[in-house]
Image (spheres, rainbow, N blue to C red):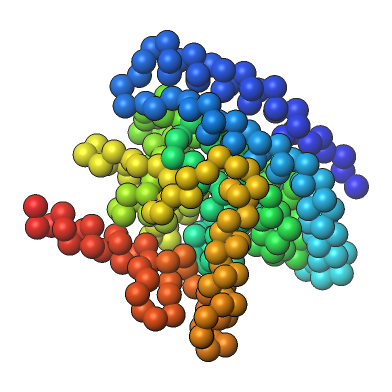
Amino acid sequence: MPDFPNIILYAIPFFILAMLLELYVTTREQLKYVKGYEPKDAFASIAMGLGNVFLGFASKGLVWLALFWVYNNFRLFTIPLAWWSFVLLFFADDLAYYWFHRISHECRLFWASHVVHHSSQHYNLSTALRQTWSGGFYSFIFWLWLPLLGFHPAMILLQMSISLLYQFWIHTEAIDKMPSWFEAIFNTPSHHRVHHGSNPIYLDRNHAGILIIWDKLFGTFQPELDDEKVKYGLVTNINTYNPVKIAFIEWWNMLKDTFTGKKSLKDRFQYLIKPPGWKHDGTGKLSDDLRQEWLNSNKQK
């Protein structure tokens, strides 16, 4: 079995130094329109990141078992450890991440864990550390087709870590735009600011990991608009810095919607699989509804 290092652990000092540099730049230079850091929010994000790392030791074991079970029993090919296989894996992993991320916004069962990452009303490098405590135990299903093709589990986990490491630096307002060729191909701070926006026009857009081309290909791309400043957070914010509440409040809300009140069995099940905002009585609004209302309102101006 190939022995690859845990690059996320090695990157922790880099994360700390980068946050300190961002804090210095955004406070000393007083960048226009940049919020900077709010201590309680930043510490909550860091606490969520530490919890993710600790729980990751358990979830990684489950992921290892699942990937190896598929690889050892069902793989169609055996892809060797070679430079070209890592190139193929780069694109395959990024495509898997896109669909995981997109479904995490379109299915409440996955949103229950992913909402953690969107719960901050600030946007800086500490926000990148605001990670789920529960998602690691089931989100890996989006990557099971990779060992089926014949990619070794160790390669897959390494590439997943590389993707996560890349996405750290795009959580900042200190960088406005990258060169146009880079913006056209890669995920950038500008693209990802859109993803974290609660503005109707920005909802559920730009799900990319490393390559923004997937959003352009599958119709979920939205550029950052000069006249629409990004408002970070959720459509309905949870307004808490308590890490436990941040981690589990949407699980509580989802299960309450599912198991309480007079509903059919079908409706109860749909509270798990329908998008956030869906209600069985038709009173809920989905992100597409809010976006269409925004578009109609702006057409009239």
Rendered image quadrant of residue 79: bottom right
Kindly give the residue lying farthest to the top in the view shown: 28
Q: Position of residue 146 (x, y in %)?
A: 71, 60
Q: Residue at x 40, y 42 (%)?
A: 232
Q: Give how far across and how far down residue 295 sits, in percent.
A: 21, 58
- For image coordinates 55% across by 40% down, the residue present is 241
Q: Nearer the viewer, residue 100 or 79?
A: 100
| Front-lying residue, 145 or 26 | 26
At 68% from the left and 50% from the top, the residue drawn is 133
Residue 206 in view (yes/no): no
**Does residue 34 appear left or right of residue 10 in this picture?**
left
- Asked whether 281 or 57 is in front, the reply is 281
The quadrant in which residue 68 appears is bottom right
Residue 257 vertical position relative to residue 24 in the rendered view, above or below: below
Left or right placement of residue 164 versus residue 176 in this view? right
Whether residue 102 is visible: yes
Residue 11 position (above or below residue 199): above
The residue furthest right is 1
The residue lying at 65 percent from left, 47 percent from top is 244
Q: How many marks?
A: 0
Please tell me which residue lies in front, 249 or 55: 249
**Residue 273 falls left or right of residue 158:** left
Farthest residue, direction bottom: 264
Q: Is residue 283 above or below residue 180?
A: below
Residue projecting furthest to the left = 301
Where residue 15 appears, as percent x and y from the top left, is 63, 26
Where residue 141 sits in the image (x, y, percent)? Answer: 69, 64
